[in-house]
Image (spheres, helix red, strand yellow):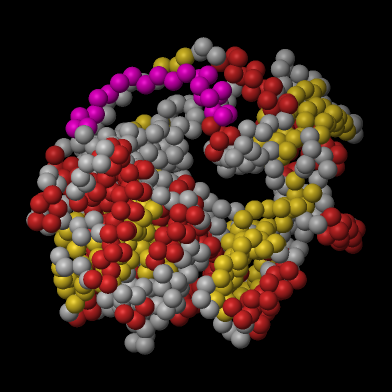
Amino acid sequence: MSTLPRLVRLRCPPTSSSLTRTSILRRQPILPSSSVIVSTPIRLLRSATTAGTLPILSALSGGNAGRRWASSAAAVKEETEESAGAAEEWPERVLPIMSEGDKGRLRRQRNVGISAHIDSGKTTLTERVLYYTGRVRDIHEVRGRDGVGAKMDSMELEREKGITIQSAATFCDWLAPPPPSEVKDVAGLDGAEKDNFAINIIDTPGHVDFTIEVERALRVLDGAVLVLCSVSGVQSQTITVDRQMRRYNVPRLAFINKMDRAGANPFRVVNQLRNKLKMNAAAVQVPIGAESDFRGVVDIVRMKAIYNEGTKGNQIVESDEIPESVRDLVEEKRAELIEHLSDADKTLCDLFLDEQPISNLDIAQALRRATISLRFTPVFVGSAIKNTGIQPLLDGVTSYLPSPDEVHNQALDAALPAHAPPVPLVPAQEAPLVGLAFKLEEGRYGQLTYMRVYQGELKRGSLIFNARTGKKVKVPRLVRMHSDEMEDVESIGAGEICAMFGVECSSGDTFTDGSTSFSMTSMFVPEPVISLSIRPEGNESPNFSRALNRFQKEDPTFRVHVDSESQETIISGMGELHLDIYVERMKREYNVACITGKPRVAFRETITVPSKFDYTHKKQSGGSGQFGKVKGTLEPMEIDPDTGKDTAFENRVIGGNIPNQYIPAIEKGFQEALDRGQLTGHPINGCKFILEDGAAHVNDSNELSFRLAALGAFREAFGKAKPVVLEPVMTVEVVAPIEFQGNVIGAINQRKGTIIDTEIRDDEFTLTAEVALNDMFGYSSQLRGMTQGKGEFSMEYKTHAPVMPNVQKEMTEAYRKKQLDRN
């Protein structure tokens, strides 16, 4: 009997600066006051694991997960009644204790990602951070005239196209005041001696086609900076990035960039954060001037004006004198900050309601507590291209984002059942090693594996164990990455990010020192939405398959398969740009020029109503024959929020009517039937095969018989379950000058799109619509033509939805005709 691992969302005490992470990360809070970790016996009621899961799953998925067909509900009820009262005891664990050296090192460590919509200025911002922290000697622009390109865009294709394709890691040191939680009085907020902070930074792509890069970066980071454009504000990919940050419960700061642009309005963007992203956000800075007059910022926490002077803004000048032009606005925004912060922090709320004086230190400490506990987002302003406001943002990263010991990670013990409670990981140097490989690259010296060390210490030359495969490997070389440059190190401590050479593994593998059986949960991987056929020009060379294998290993969203009918090699990915980049990389890196076919949409098939089946497979041809009988139900299934799967096999056979050794063969037959649908030949999603009864013959039954019986039963039930064809629907965001609004709306309507929202700004407008991917081919050139090249659009996958009945009929007839011609 299987049980789902229980999803628990703990609510931190409002005064705690701890961070709770959802079960996909298996993270729970550590109270900062805990100096000693007390080990207590872990007990878990299995009844809580089954019955208690249902309302929580329902809440997480808006009620859909709680919707169950009668047959499933009955089974869950039975299971709950059986397990009620049955208690299990788990091993008592003695957790390692962090030394004072560990605490001191981790308090000055930050792991931060920089994420945003396309062209919001992430890489430009990272370039300034590296310059001001002394990691690069000069500033180079993304599309600079010198042709050098930004440091973090190391790939030739990135510099040519002016976009980030792969996430890039680097590290730097920054002298900053201690976090507000360590400051004892108001005077210490300004006069404290600065400390050196070690910051690991991952710059991520903004294009939706490379969303897996953002996904795996946020999986291992402790905090993030969400960059927004002061003119465009919250855009489509901003919403996606926000969703990813919420999935992994990553605390974030918001940075409103491009304050020098015409039409810059940071407070409109703050309102969009509150309304569109449902954030409790407020500005912690007020700009001094805007557009071409943007000169600096006012820190409304410490009430100081901050200006950038000197060569490329490398000198910070602070003044207690706030310019007269913004003084009233500063007072208004400070009151607004205190009001929003009081909603997120109990200590500040008590001061606010009691009408007691609130000091700068009270605000700063409340900011840190509320940000780390995910109840508030501080908003900074600046202009990366004009070298203004970057140093105060770095001070905000060190002051308000958590250190590795404030985010308590958890692992699963592979030696225990799936429903066993997770094991807390302590970032102590002397603890057993636990690390997660989150990104792979093919380097000059073999496979380069990026790893986040959660516990223990990783040393060069040490032996580590892959928790998935059980293989023992030696770490031949250990490096810290600075974009495409490397710095050799002898060891890496807990809470840090590094890379190692010569270790064969897959993305998402857990590594230990062999003394434990811990395993970390992996990251979420979205399904591909577009496919196209590919073949090399001329004769096929070994480099063709070598390149495809490497790209598959590096990128979980890039899939390759051979079509069983046409025998063509099919590549699948997140969009046209995604696949175009890989085709271009094959030409440049492997000298294999390729010919591609017309893009294909990733259609799916599913059922809409439950359907019973009672199928017998019999075959007699002399001697022992084949016999297998299966009975049960095929019913629709929602996506399981815990596993992310929407197909399942459930065995409810009792009494041994079907011998246990044949059950896996029935499941195999079901999985085989899912590969090719009956309507259009596309894969089948969203259905559950419930096996309730059957029969076997002493001599004639075997695994083949029951696999074929399952295949036949599925085909029989699928036809009666009102099947439909699903197509991917994209959220499309178009930005164009206002004079072309009518043309743009007309073109979207022509493509059968549904307009969701239209936002008009000074001289341009943003249109958000939902359009089927199949209707979006060729839109790029159409948009350029109708807007004189001034319009741009982005799209991201939203969901699969049924196609129109007439389209389904055409697709089904075309597929049947193709099958008849082939036969």
Q: Is residue 49 magenta?
A: yes
Q: Is residue 403 left or right of residue 777?
A: left
Mark yes or no: residue 278 visible.
yes
Residue numbers of the magenta segment: 34-55
Residue furthest top in the image = 85
Query: Residue 138: x and y, percent?
Result: 24, 79
Query: Residue 248: x and y, percent?
Result: 43, 46
- Quadrant that contains the N terminus: top right
Q: Nearer the viewer, residue 63 or 219?
A: 63
Name the residue located 58 percent from the left edge and 84 percent from the top edge: 789
Q: Is residue 432 magenta?
A: no
Q: Is residue 503 left or right of residue 759?
A: left
Mark yes or no: residue 426 visible.
no
Q: Is residue 783 left or right of residue 501?
A: right
Name the residue located 10 percent from the left edge and 52 percent from the top edge: 187
456 is higher (above) or lower (below) than 395: above
